[in-house]
Image (cartoon, helix red, strand yellow):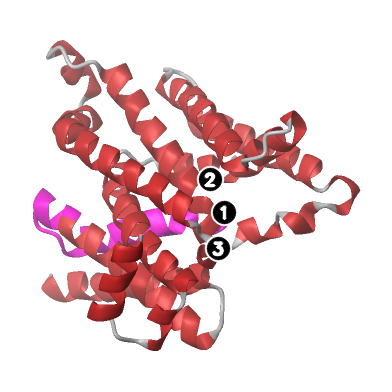
Amino acid sequence: MGIVYDILEKILPFSWTSYEFMKNAFIAVILITPLLGMVGTMVVQKKMAFFSDALGHSALTGIALGVILGVRNTNVSMVIFAVIFALLLNKIKSRQGIEADTIISVFASCSIAVGLIVLSYKGNFNNYSALLIGDILSITTGEIKALLIVFVVTSLLWGVLYNKMLFISMNSALARSKGIRVNLIENIFVILIAVIVMLAIRWIGILLINALMILPVAAAKNIASNVREYHFFAVTFALFSGISGLLVSYYMNVACGPVIIVYASALFFLSYIVKILKK
């Protein structure tokens, strides 16, 4: 990481680059936000905003299970639980004749309630309250390396599977008739969401993670005229919101996550105005 730090100090000669925690946070932002913007395009396309929100809230239960089982690294318990939870929700969502939104809401509510009960036992919830709004300045070098691996793997899978996922989102029955393994691809997609959300949630916050996944994409959708522009603007808006939010939060000495969401919200409203003016 030393070489990366040196490069940052040379290309960004600002006072904050002299702090290792800020350089770590900056690297994390340029990895996390494009991931959320990229994956968020399909979340919006498949109308899964409620799904991803429920998944984010399940983080507390993942941590609680880790505490009960004595898992030292709660990131591990969060990711494992989130993957199982996501696959279960996806199974429910795919069932015909079932009110999926209602059942997902029940699962999400129960999940967060169980997590809060366990984590608040004997007044210990203060140890975990930071998860609600996140703290990107606490990210470590090891976590950045894990995030880099997820970034590379997700980008490769996205390049291979995107067209098939888009086809499935438009007509899953026709996709099956063409020999596309719909269930497998959808399961891979929800696993990606689960892993990305759980890795990012400590730094963005449970209350805000879904907003960062949806707002830049919604803003991109307002002004994009094709799929390529849609992805470009989604990733660009997410990246801009992340970097701007981090720097403003540093100079204003406020929580980073909420500032990022304020920038993403501003971009959405501006893009909405542009959309109206185009008509």
Cα separation, mark 1 vs mark 3, equals: 16 Å
User: Where, quadrant-wise, is the C terminus in this rendering?
Assistant: bottom left
Q: What SS does tag 2 mark?
A: helix
Q: What SS does tag 3 mark?
A: helix
Label 3 Cα crowd, 10 Å radius (few <14 / some 14-19 / many 20+): some
In the picture, the disc for residue 87 is none
| Residue 72 at x, y percent in the picture | 67, 39
User: Where, quadrant-wise, is the N terminus in this rendering?
Assistant: bottom left
Residue that label 1 marks: 206
**Along the viewing direction, whichever of 263 and 139 lies nearer the viewer:** 139
Residue at (57% x, 31% y) in the render:
81
Q: Bounds of the magenta span? A: 205-231
Q: Amino acid at mark 3?
A: Ser
Residue at (30% x, 72% y) in the render:
6
Who comes first in sequence, dot 2 or dot 1? Answer: 2
Label 2 Cα crowd, 10 Å radius (few <14 / some 14-19 / many 20+): many
Residue that label 3 marks: 138
In the picture, the disc for residue 56 is 2
User: Disc 2, disc 1: CB below 8 Å?
Assistant: yes
With respect to residue 177, does 40 lie above or below? below
Q: Quadrant of residue 141?
A: bottom left
